[in-house]
Amino acid sequence: MKAIIPAAGLGTRFLPATKSMPKELLPVLDKPVIQYVVEEALEPEGVDGVIIVNSREKPQIEDYFSIDEKLEDMLSSRGKDELAQRVHEASTLPVSFVYQDNPCGLGHAVLCAAEAVGAEPFFVLLGDYFVPDRQMCLRMKEVSKEHGGASVIAVAPVPEDQTNRYGIIAGECTNRSETADAESEGAVWKVSGLVEKPEPKDAPSHLFIVGRYLLSSRIMELLATQGPGAGNEIQLTDAMERLLAEEEMYALVVDPAEGCDTGTPAAWAATNARMALLDPNQIDAFKEALGQAAENLG
């Protein structure tokens, strides 16, 4: 079983930094964002490889996941064996690459990995969001197993007045009583439709897709014949709508605060702060640096 991480985007929100550095390699503390996502993707049992859909203009991502014996030897010669081991571990993760030569949408990016995935279900993890405890995909796989191997997407509540910013699911909750909140964490919905950016009065729920998918291999066949949609691009959501006509699909409600967003400069900065506060090796130094910064601003 494989996991796909689309990483061919231009990273325009981070320009000019991304003029020479892929946004996927922006560091969160001492690791690039994409390594967090790769490690999360490998967590569920049975996932034995990650396919990164890359652009040929971003060879730095492949360089990062390649062995650098010269660097490792230099670190070891200076007594930095632990750091050399961390560098080695990052470069030996089971990662392979395919290419999206033209930015034609998320659905097209996923389709680029069709041959590498084969006829098996697969995960898709969007690369500007990661889950520190790596449990979300594990729970999605459990939901899929409970429902005969059905496709599963992760969703989270959004304020009612913001439904027109997201893709919203339609359906019904399968595991909550009438007195419980059907949109709370842990609820499982049987999906009947996917509505792109509905106005609040038209929204069938307040649950939006958060960037984690466990999909049937049938989706690849549908993407191969999928016409352009919004933005004149091949949209994964459009193919998922077609999949619903043939197969069941479920949605697992997650806590939106469970994951870390790195999709904008402000979110990326906040994620660095959050991870520093969670890291026992970083928290004291971070608090000291933050205090000094506050004094300088004061």
Image (spheres, rainbow, N blue to C red):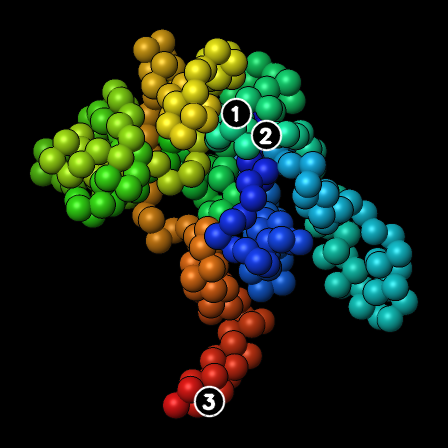
In the image, residue 7 sits, relative to residue 143, either above or below, namely below
Q: Residue furthest left?
A: 179
Q: Is residue 139 above or below residue 66?
A: above
What residue does disc 2 label?
Answer: 102
Quadrant position of residue 247: top left
Q: Earlier in the sequence, mark 2 or mark 1?
A: 2
Residue 58 percent across, percent down from the top left: 68, 43
Name the residue located 87 percent from the left edge and 52 percent from the top edge.
Answer: 69
Residue at image coords 22%, 25%: 171
**Which label's residue is closer to the chain start, 3 or 1?**
1
Q: Which mark is residue 296?
A: 3
Q: Residue at x 59, y 58 (%)?
A: 17
> In front: mark 2 or mark 1?
2
Query: What residue sits right under mark 1 in the picture?
Result: 108
Q: Is residue 280 visible?
A: yes
Task: Tell me residue 245's x, y (percent).
Answer: 32, 11
Depth check: give the residue in front, 67 or 167: 167
Label 2–label 1 contact, CB within 8 A: yes
How much space separates mark 2 and mark 3, taking CA atoms? 46 Å
